[in-house]
Image (cartoon, rainbow, N blue to C red):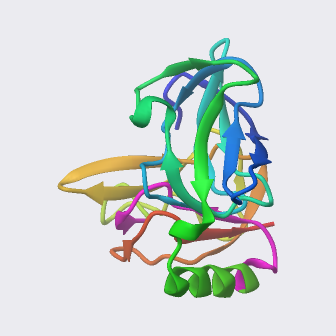
Amino acid sequence: MSDGRRFAKGLEVRGERDDAGRLTLFAPRPGLWRDAPREGALVRPGDAVGELEVLGVVHALRAPADAFGVVSGLPGGRRLGRRPVDARTALMTLDPEGVSGEEAAKVAAEAAADASGPVFRTPLGGRFYARPSPDADPFVTPGLALKGGETIALIEVMKTFNRVQYAGEPATVKAVRAKDGDDVEAGDVLLELE
């Protein structure tokens, strides 16, 4: 299932840390940036930090390995639908001081659980649906080969169903962690990949 856009492998954004420990993330190349995380959202290594459209090709943007903190600064203090950027444009600032001790412990536990391999995290919170209708086959099953643009699930938020699409490098589904009808939060692991 595809919406007409071309999807390419994901890109990792660059980060520069200041003296106070805050990490500023920069665009990896020129393009149109969209789907920025909300102010106050927790960003961890490998998390989605938006998409970059370059000449009609959409690249999922991923946080670098040293990223950890809450979004404390978006350019202009707001989210825009699409924003032109170049390779030196600051996308956001992450503040590790904004993370509560409880959240830091949860992240450490998830990191240990995820050490077995790559995972796919939900970009938004809501009710998880593994299939398009109750009597249909699930979007993904263990052993399925994934490529960019494929629908993984539906997430219902306030009676609106949002398609969750895979935009990473080709991978195989190892396990589906969320169950049909589960309530998930942004950043929860949906799939284990290999």
Q: Is residue 57 shown to the viewer in this render?
A: no
Q: Which residue is most to the left? A: 159
**Image position of 155 with respect to 78: above or below:** below
Image vertical order of residue 152 relative to residue 57, above or below: below
Identify the magenta region.
Answer: 113-129
Q: Note whether 147 is above or below 59 in the view shown.
A: below
Note whether residue 121 is visible. Answer: yes
What residue occupies the far top of the structure in this picture? 55
- The x, y position of residue 50, in whole percent, is 57, 40
Who is closer to the viewer here, 176 or 34? 34
Q: Identify which residue is drawn at 69% across, 42% down.
A: 25
Looking at the image, which is closer to me, 167 or 133?
A: 167
Tell me the residue at 62%/79% (across/down).
Answer: 107
Does residue 27 appear to the left or right of 74 in the view shown?
A: right
x, y percentage for residue 54? 68, 18
Residue 92 spot, x, y in % from top left: 58, 41
Give me the residue at 63% from left, 15% from top: 56
